[in-house]
Amino acid sequence: MTSCNIIWDLLPLYTENLVSEESRQLIEKHIATCEECRTMLHRMQSDDTTTKPSGHEDFQTVLRSHKKKNNRKTLIFTLLAILLSTFLCLGYLWYRGVFHIVERQTSPNGATTTTVYNCDFARYGRFPVSGGFTLIDKGYFNGSTTYQYARFQGLWWSVNGNYQVVSMYTDEGLWLSLTDYTRNIGANLDAHIDTALYNDDFFREVIYNEATGQREIEFQFVQWSLKDEPNMLIYFTYTDSQNQFHEGYFWYNYETGNVSGEMEI
């Protein structure tokens, strides 16, 4: 037969619903036949503290304190785990350059997607480094190009996705680069356009800078032609030797190198 002393020790836990199922069955079996223990249980449940066993109140206080400490530890470990997971997640996203994306475009034919990052991935692998910007192609064409001393300005796909123009700001001003996906090559579009204009009388007043070996004219890409894919509309600006400012538009065909439709505004 179970000792009443053992039952009395377990009754505080029983009233708090903190005993195991086996202990619960043992207590309930005992109090069913023991009037004294049953009376004590009723008094404890009615909160009659004057008749509770000695040390019951202290035991309850210690028990509650222990539960609070365990809950506090659990909360702290949970918060630390959340913070660590968040830090690792943010670190991975930073490593992948997600926070550095400034542009993402898919070619009209759906073959290649170009993502532009406002950082330098070239010299240190996937770790983004400030300065310059990087283009990464995914799809039919895979590769990356980094411009270390420039700021991204814009990106335009041609109608069929065969060509891509990228505009950027450099110390010398606005600069255009073209990627020819039909040949998988890159080109200095400014140099190509300037060469095409060299013998054009419409641009005879453009100043040639002997120090830089370049003519002082700036080009800005406007749009691709919807009818003739290699044809692009270019906006130009320059100041002549008489300090007169000139600006206007013309069409330039990348495949043939021809210039047409020159117009000053």
Image: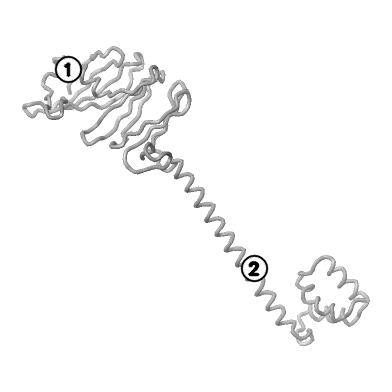
Q: CA distance from mark 2 to mark 1?
A: 81 Å
Q: In x, y percent, where is residue 242?
A: 6, 27
- Mark 2: amino acid: Asn
Q: Inspect the image, locate mark 1, and give the three-letter code of the amino acid beneath it.
A: Tyr
The quarter of the displayed image where residue 256 is located: top left
Q: Where is residue 18 shown, x and y percent of the image?
A: 76, 69
The residue lying toward the viewer, choosing from 148 and 87, is: 148
Secondary element at tag 2: helix
Label 1 crowd (10 A; few <14 / some 14-19 / many >=20)? few
- In the current view of this chain or complex, which residue is farthest to the left? 242
Decide if residue 258 is in sight here: yes
Q: Is residue 254 above or below residue 42?
A: above
Which residue is farthest bottom?
A: 50
Q: Position of residue 106 (x, y in %)?
A: 44, 27
Residue, disc 1: 198
Question: In the figure, residue 136 lies in which quadrant?
Answer: top left
Task: Identify which residue is drawn at 81% across, 76% down.
Answer: 11
Q: Earlier in the sequence, mark 2 or mark 1?
A: 2
Note whether 78 is above or below 169 in the view shown: below
| Residue at the spot of label 2 | 70
Task: From the viewer's perspective, tell me whether residue 50 is left or right of residue 34.
Answer: left
Residue 99 location, x and y as percent?
A: 42, 43
Element at label 1: loop
Q: Is residue 68 left or right of residue 237?
A: right
